[in-house]
């Protein structure tokens, strides 16, 4: 059976189904991260003292990671735009760069975590580190999830371009929406945890 | 052909947004070195983050020109998100809960 509305828009929503689907998923993600952000606020205002992020975390590394994720967002949108312009070779380059940016982000985060572990700074160390590891760890898992999808669409999944190019372009758009959301979450995590 | 021209125009916007995001990141980090009062630092950092988030959502995620169904879902999300963010205020006005906070 053919899956309906993978290319054409559904008359009532005006969207292909996967697009509405990913936005509903992202809405649930807003609530997930929102719950953790509100927990952060509650923990912070209730704590007798709260460390300034910049004194115990590595701001230059986190700034670099911000630049890496922002760069990966533009390469992702360029990957989609390349398909829209019928240029599959450029798509592969941009999608490959997006994947590599994900690798770079995780490596930098790994260095940061490693240094903290060396100094015996674990989630059990303080409320600050508990919420820091929870928020950045969950975000890191989202990066890994996005990389799996992006890697698939760069590699084996890209075969669909030959048979159903429009459907493949829509898949890349949907993966892109998720990836930009992961970038968006980091845009808030970075100042909240590191700079305030 | 028309679509290609259209996308090329979009690409120029994406590059402009990318430069703006880098500039705003520099501003956020620079402001943090000014050692402002905590409430001032929080307000500035959140405003800059909101502008950055707005740029990503509007242009990279194409929210600036989306269909009504997505806006409807997101309005509902924004309302519930606002309630979530207000929870600490509710908690602090709750005398039973506050008894347990040092």
Image (tube, coloured by chain):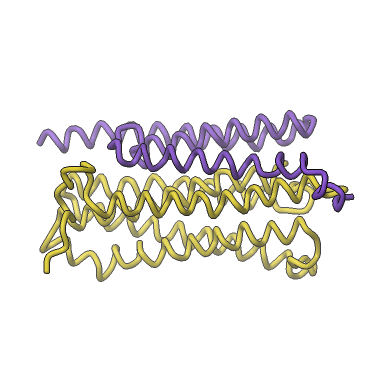
The residue depicted at 12 percent of the width and 33 percent of the height is B2
Give how far across and how far down residue A71 sits, in percent: 45, 47
Drawing shade for chain B: purple
Q: Quadrant of the C terminus of chain A?
A: top right
Drawing shade for chain A: yellow
Q: Which residue lies furthest to the right in this view?
A: B102
Give how far across and how far down residue B30 sits, in percent: 67, 33
Considering depth in this image, is A150 or A16 the residue closer to the camera? A16
Asked if residue A99 lies left or right of residue B92, the reply is left
Q: How many labels does the image show?
A: 0
Placement of A174 over or under A14, stated as above or below: below
Placement of B91 over or under A159, stated as above or below: above
The residue depicted at 52 percent of the width and 43 percent of the height is B80
The residue depicted at 62 percent of the width and 53 percent of the height is A36
Considering depth in this image, is B22 or A46 the residue closer to the camera? A46
Q: In which quarter of the image is the N terminus of chain A?
A: bottom left
Give how far across and how far down residue B92 sits, in percent: 77, 42
Placement of A66 over or under B40, stated as above or below: below
Q: Residue furthest front?
A: B96
Asked if residue B78 lies left or right of residue A109, the reply is left
Give how far across and how far down residue A23 sits, in percent: 36, 49
Q: In which quarter of the image is residue B60?
A: top left
Q: In which quarter of the image is residue A163?
A: bottom left
Q: In which quarter of the image is residue B48?
A: top right
The residue depicted at 70 percent of the width and 53 percent of the height is A58
């Amino acid at each position: 059976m053919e899956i309906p509305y993978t290319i054409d828009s559904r008359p009532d929503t005006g969207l292909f189904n996967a697009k509405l689907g990913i936005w509903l998923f992202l809405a649930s993600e807003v609530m997930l991260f929102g719950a953790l952000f509100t927990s952060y606020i509650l923990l912070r205002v209730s704590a007798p003292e709260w460390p300034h992020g910049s004194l115990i975390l590595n701001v230059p590394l986190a700034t670099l990671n911000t630049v890496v994720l922002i760069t990966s967002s533009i390469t992702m949108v360029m990957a989609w735009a390349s398909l829209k312009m019928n240029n599959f070779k450029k798509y592969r380059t941009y999608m490959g760069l997006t994947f590599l940016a994900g690798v770079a982000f995780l490596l930098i985060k790994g260095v940061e975590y490693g240094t903290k572990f060396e100094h015996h700074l674990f989630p059990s160390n303080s409320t600050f580190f508990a919420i820091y590891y929870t928020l950045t760890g969950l975000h890191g898992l989202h990066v890994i999830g996005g990389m799996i999808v992006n890697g698939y669409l760069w590699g084996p999944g890209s075969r669909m371009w030959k048979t159903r190019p429009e459907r493949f372009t829509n898949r890349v758009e949907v993966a892109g929406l998720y990836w930009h959301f992961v970038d968006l979450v980091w845009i808030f995590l970075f100042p909240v945890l590191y700079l305030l | 052909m028309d679509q290609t021209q259209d996308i090329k125009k979009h690409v120029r916007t994406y590059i402009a947004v990318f430069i703006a995001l880098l500039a705003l990141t520099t501003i956020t980090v620079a402001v943090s070195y000014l050692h402002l009062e905590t409430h001032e630092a929080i307000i500035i950092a959140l405003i800059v983050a909101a502008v950055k988030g707005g740029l990503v959502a509007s242009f990279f995620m194409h929210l600036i020109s989306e269909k009504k169904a997505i806006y409807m879902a997101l309005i509902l999300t924004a309302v519930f998100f606002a309630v979530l963010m207000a929870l600490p205020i509710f908690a602090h006005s709750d005398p039973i809960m506050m008894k347990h906070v040092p």
